[in-house]
Image: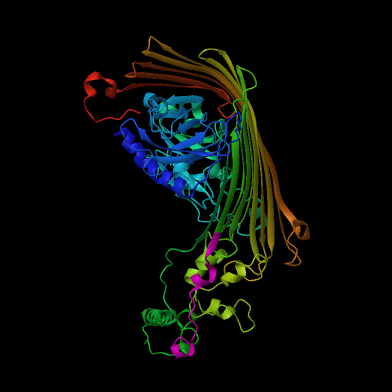
């Protein structure tokens, strides 16, 4: 049953590979034989249960020549010499090497690779077999969740992991999402999990967006200069195509190894690395479009005029006791029908302002990677570009990313690894959040009268103060605010992370690992609002601008001893002991200006700089970690974890905190009396 389930999961992928995929396979040595008469070898590949295996790699050893078995497990390959060796390999099965000799038909039965079927997942500071884990950990492979034209991996996780709630806080391109692991755990503090990217822990603030329209003092230079909330998702620095797997640690037993920072759960991201068995180049290109799935149903011009006239007549009757037939000349302004509304045939305009501000937005994604190596060195290099336009005019997001993962076996007992990743993102965001009186074009599109035209007789965005006075839900033309000369919110974000590892095998089962890494980030926010953008009914409100620049750097050093040993075939024991040091510092410089003499020069120096701030922040942490895992005959499991953190964030008189955890497990499927029941699958 296990193999059949495996075939069922792999069959669609293998069929696609067979029909469309190409792969380049290499081995460490080369062997060239020249022959004038090729020899054709045919055969079939089966599993131990007699079921044919499609997608098996059949390679001539020492060459790059190979084929893949078809849907019935059959293959046909040409060789140049009968001394050639065919290598049969397939995921989940042990590879076989067969010398051709005088054979013309070679049928092969591949044995199950039990080791590969025992899934190994990443836990804090190490790995474990899934069947031996006592904590709550969910794993999603990169290939399982990869979707075209998606900017960040967190959106790909939606609905895929039990106990993890993912919601978008904004629909802007490259915008933030909120991730909650097993619900809200703090009222005043953050609820975001800790992210560990290739061993480097990164704290990310809650994924909120700018919902307050530049703060309480709307459009003031002070408010603009204090705009600090990210609109670009910090997780956009991670290219989804580079991800090998994501493990989400959800309970206390799993997260205790990360101490206080694991209180909201831990998301461990492992990126892809090179392989010594094959070299390959992958190119991923996708193009898609986004559009509004469902517009809000609004009244057309005829319905709107009838609605307004009826409402204002009712207001006149209710407040004065008059008749709905009384002329507008004797009524107060709010009880008068707007010009032409009592004669609907005089108004021919019928505008759906949603159609004016929305568009069909393209999304382009280009990714390329090269990986390979030999027994001494393995590598993976990747780079890419994403361009996502928003469904609202002038909104867009672009991302450039590069990565280099290198592993080298420099000595028999010494291995070094390096992970280098770089990211640069830039986004443009119209003000689509907050009150429509504060120049929110989305809200204006939902409230403006459909009787108002889009353009005037000169082809410019239409505006008439009379429509404001007559109360038609009209404060500005959305196209005026969606013109970047009048309003702009441009942001950039850059990140560079380098993490280097050294592993030394002290003796069988005992490995010392040391890492040192640096994570640098920088961001810029540039805000501009011309006097063409009103504040409620106030026109010619003074132009204002603000700029905020932020830089941060964090360095990390981790040192661990890991010991694994199996005693008398039943007692499995592994232990981890180590200490870590991390320090982070950040700096923010911002300024705001007003009283610009012209709308054509948006630099702060063109106005009067009258607001700003300069802040510095710093924190550091020293931690001691320890963990013991014990398993008896694969039945009885014990995990004991402790972490002791000394942090500058803790209280002045309580700088150290200890975070212990104990958990137990019982694999009933390993009991002899359960072997005859096909109820549990323990792999």
| Bounds of the magenta segment | 340-362
Q: Position of residue 47 (x, y in %)?
A: 35, 33
Check the image and report above or below for 320 versus 678. Answer: below
At x 30%, y 30%, the residue is 681
Q: Position of residue 615 (x, y in %)?
A: 68, 41
Q: Position of residue 627 (x, y in %)?
A: 47, 19
Check the image and report above or below for 363 versus 479. Answer: above
Q: How is the image coloured?
A: rainbow
Q: Quadrant of residue 335?
A: bottom left
At x 21%, y 25%, the residue is 676
Quarter of the image for the C terminus: give it: top left
Q: Position of residue 97 (x, y in %)?
A: 47, 27
Decide which of 43, 374 is in the foreground and name it. 43
Question: Is residue 194 left or right of 675 when viewed as pictured?
Answer: right
Q: How many marks?
A: 0
Decide which of 284, 227 is in the foreground and name it. 284
Question: Is residue 115 left or right of 208 when viewed as pictured?
Answer: left
Decide which of 678, 485 is in the foreground and name it. 678
The single residue placed furthest to the front in the displayed view is 37
Quarter of the image for the N terminus: give it: top left
| Residue 652 visible in the displayed image | yes
Q: Quadrant of residue 607?
A: bottom right
| Residue 556 visible in the displayed image | no
Check the image and report above or below for 277 versus 594. Answer: above
Check the image and report above or below for 56 versus 674. Answer: below
Question: Is residue 453 left or right of 342 when viewed as pictured?
Answer: right
The single residue placed furthest to the top in the displayed view is 568
User: Was residue 172 drawn as part of the magenta stretch in this picture?
Assistant: no
């Amino acid at each position: 049953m296990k193999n059949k389930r495996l075939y069922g999961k792999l069959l669609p992928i293998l069929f696609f590979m067979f029909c469309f995929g190409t792969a380049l396979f290499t081995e460490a040595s080369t062997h060239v034989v020249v022959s004038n008469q090729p020899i054709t070898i045919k055969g079939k590949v089966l599993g131990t249960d007699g079921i044919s295996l499609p997608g098996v790699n059949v390679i001539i050893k020492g060459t790059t020549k190979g084929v893949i078995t078809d849907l019935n497990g059959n293959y046909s390959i040409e060789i140049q010499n009968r001394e050639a060796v065919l290598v049969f390999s397939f995921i989940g099965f042990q590879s076989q090497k067969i010398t051709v000799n005088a054979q013309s038909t070679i049928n092969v039965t591949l044995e199950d690779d039990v080791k590969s079927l025992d899934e190994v997942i990443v836990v804090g500071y190490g790995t474990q077999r899934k069947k031996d884990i006592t904590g709550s950990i969910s794993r999603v492979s990169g290939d399982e969740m990869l979707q075209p034209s998606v900017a960040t991996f967190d959106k790909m996780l939606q609905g895929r992991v039990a106990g993890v709630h993912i919601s978008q806080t904004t629909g802007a391109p490259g915008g933030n999402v909120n991730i909650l692991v097993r619900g809200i755990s703090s009222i005043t503090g953050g609820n975001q999990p800790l992210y560990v990217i290739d061993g480097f822990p990164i704290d990310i603030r809650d994924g909120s967006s700018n919902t307050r329209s530049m703060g309480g003092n709307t459009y003031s230079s002070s408010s603009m200069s204090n705009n600090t909330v990210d609109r670009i998702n910090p997780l956009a620095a991670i290219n989804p195509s580079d991800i090998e797997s994501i493990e989400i640690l959800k309970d206390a037993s799993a997260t205790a190894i990360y101490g206080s920072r694991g209180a909201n759960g831990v998301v461990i991201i492992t990126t892809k690395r090179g392989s010594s068995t094959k070299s390959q180049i992958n190119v991923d290109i996708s193009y898609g479009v986004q559009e509004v799935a469902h517009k809000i149903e609004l009244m057309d011009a005829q319905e709107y005029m009838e609605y307004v006239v009826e409402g204002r007549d009712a207001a006149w009757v209710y407040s004065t006791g008059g008749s709905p037939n009384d002329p507008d000349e004797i009524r107060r302004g709010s009880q008068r029908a707007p010009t032409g509304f009592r004669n609907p045939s005089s108004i021919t305009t019928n505008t759906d302002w949603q159609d004016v501000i929305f568009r069909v937005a393209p999304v382009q994604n280009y990714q390329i990677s090269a990986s390979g190596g030999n027994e001494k060195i393995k590598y993976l290099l990747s780079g890419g570009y994403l361009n996502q336009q928003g469904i609202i005019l002038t909104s867009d997001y672009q991302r450039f990313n590069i990565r280099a993962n290198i592993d080298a076996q420099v000595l028999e007992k010494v291995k070094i690894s390096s992970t280098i990743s770089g990211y640069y993102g830039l986004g443009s965001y119209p003000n689509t959040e907050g009150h429509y009186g504060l120049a929110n074009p989305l809200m204006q599109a939902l409230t403006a009268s459909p009787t108002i035209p889009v353009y005037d007789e000169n082809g410019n965005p239409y505006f008439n103060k009379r429509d404001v006075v007559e109360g038609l839900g009209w404060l500005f033309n959305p196209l005026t605010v969606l013109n970047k000369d009048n309003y702009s919110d441009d942001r950039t974000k850059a990140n560079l992370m380098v993490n280097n590892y050294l592993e030394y095998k002290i003796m069988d089962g005992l490995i010392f690992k040391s890492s040192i890494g640096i994570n640098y980030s920088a961001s810029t926010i540039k805000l501009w609002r011309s006097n063409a953008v009103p504040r409620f009914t106030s026109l010619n409100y003074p132009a204002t601008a603000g700029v905020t620049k932020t830089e941060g750097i964090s360095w990390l050093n981790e040192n661990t001893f890991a010991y694994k040993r199996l005693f008398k075939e039943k007692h499995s024991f592994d232990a981890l002991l180590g200490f870590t040091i991390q320090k982070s510092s950040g700096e923010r410089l911002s300024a705001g200006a007003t009283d610009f003499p012209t709308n054509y020069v948006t630099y702060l120096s063109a106005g009067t700089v009258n607001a700003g701030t300069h802040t510095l922040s710093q924190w550091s942490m020293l931690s001691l970690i320890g963990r013991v895992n014990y398993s008896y005959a694969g039945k009885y499991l014990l995990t004991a974890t402790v972490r002791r953190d000394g942090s500058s964030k803790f209280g002045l008189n309580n700088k150290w905190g200890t975070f212990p955890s104990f958990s137990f497990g019982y694999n009933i499927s390993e009991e002899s009396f359960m072997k005859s029941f096909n109820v549990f699958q323990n792999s």
